Image (cartoon, grey):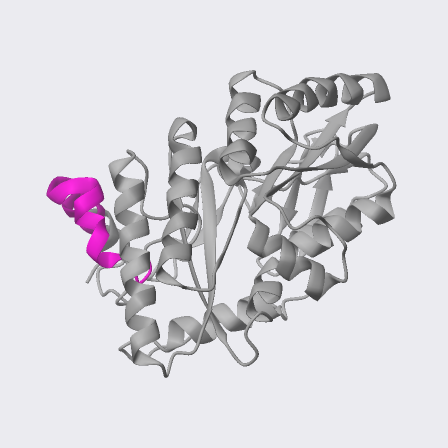
Amino acid sequence: MSRDSIYNLIYSLKLRGKDGVCLSTAAIEGGICEVNEADFDVSVRPSVTRKQLNTHIRNTGLFFPVGTMKENVRNLEVVLADGSILYTRGKGARPRLHPRPQAQSVALCHFPTVAEAVNSVVETLQMGVPIARIEFLDHVQVAACNKYSHLTLPEQPTLALEFHGQTDAEVGQQAQVVGDICAQNNGSAFEWSTELEEMEKLWTARHNAYYAALAMRTGAVGFTTDVCVPITKLAETIVETRKDLDETGLKGVIVGHVGDGNFHVILPVFEENEEEMKAVHAFSDRLVRRALSANGTCTGEHGIGVGKIQYLAEEFGPIGVQTMKKIKSALDPKNILNPGKVFA
């Protein structure tokens, strides 16, 4: 298992409230069963990671992208509570593959304020620029990444952008449009990288953002939370969240795949400090209510789990929750899968 997986497992177990069995699929061998180049998909088992898949298919001209999953999975093979198998569409778990871009580049852009950085994202999306990836890091996260990953980036709110195209000219055209938008929001000139090694170094630093945040306080553990809001509300929500952290004195970072309105807050905490944890939970509650008031959702990627059960009815209403419970009961009548999660 990866360090992320181990940490998330441990964090969940501390809140479980019931005995149970946790099953890891990490040791399953032969995870990639069949690559269908003509159909642009692949049959995989649960143990496969995105990086492993892309390494396996690197000579096919295809790849599996970073991003939301619903558009990139054609079928799932689901084991139900009674052991029966459900196929959602066809057979096997089949992620959708995409043609590998002939040209790609990564650019960094730094901004004086959080608002200017996030407004650049919103305007880029509204312009319909087919950008492959947009990641936001606030100035505290950039400083943490500099120290942890041995970088020398300006410690300002930063966007990391990835452009894909079939030609360098196509990539350049995309970048020109986004660059103009960023410049209008007082962004710096783009810092470019077209070398694979340099791009990997940058994205590795982004992927290590969690550990970089933890390293800000030696011996701390991570308290992570996320929300998702409409992109028109994204800038003000992130600005208010950063202000909340600063005013309460909490040491935390904001980072996110803001292209879909989702962002994360990572707080390195000492759980034995009751006053600190009280302040952290109060902050998390304010963050959720801020998102809900913006017509967003209380969680984007992390899910309801245990920590946000109390917000489920507030977001979806009693009929919505009752409907979810009926579906859960139909598929898992004895409540043996993930007991105590989502529904109290």
Task: Report whether residue 25 is seen.
Answer: no
Determine the residue positioned at 60% across, 41% down: 135
Q: Is residue 309 magenta?
A: yes
In the rendered image, the vertical position of residue 57 relative to residue 143, given as above or below? above
Where on the picture, by quarter, is residue 215?
bottom right
In this rendering, position of residue 175 left or right of residue 325? right
In the rendered image, the vertical position of residue 38 relative to residue 319, given as above or below? above
Q: Position of residue 258 (x, y in %)?
A: 52, 38
Quadrant of the frame with the N terminus? bottom right
Which of the two residues, 5 or 286, is positioned nearer the viewer here?
286
Q: Position of residue 279 (x, y in %)?
A: 30, 67
In this rendering, position of residue 232 left or right of residue 118? left
In this rendering, position of residue 21 left or right of residue 172? left
In the rendered image, the vertical position of residue 294 relative to residue 232, given as above or below? below
Determine the residue positioned at 19% across, 63% down: 344
Residue bounds of the magenta highlight: 305-325
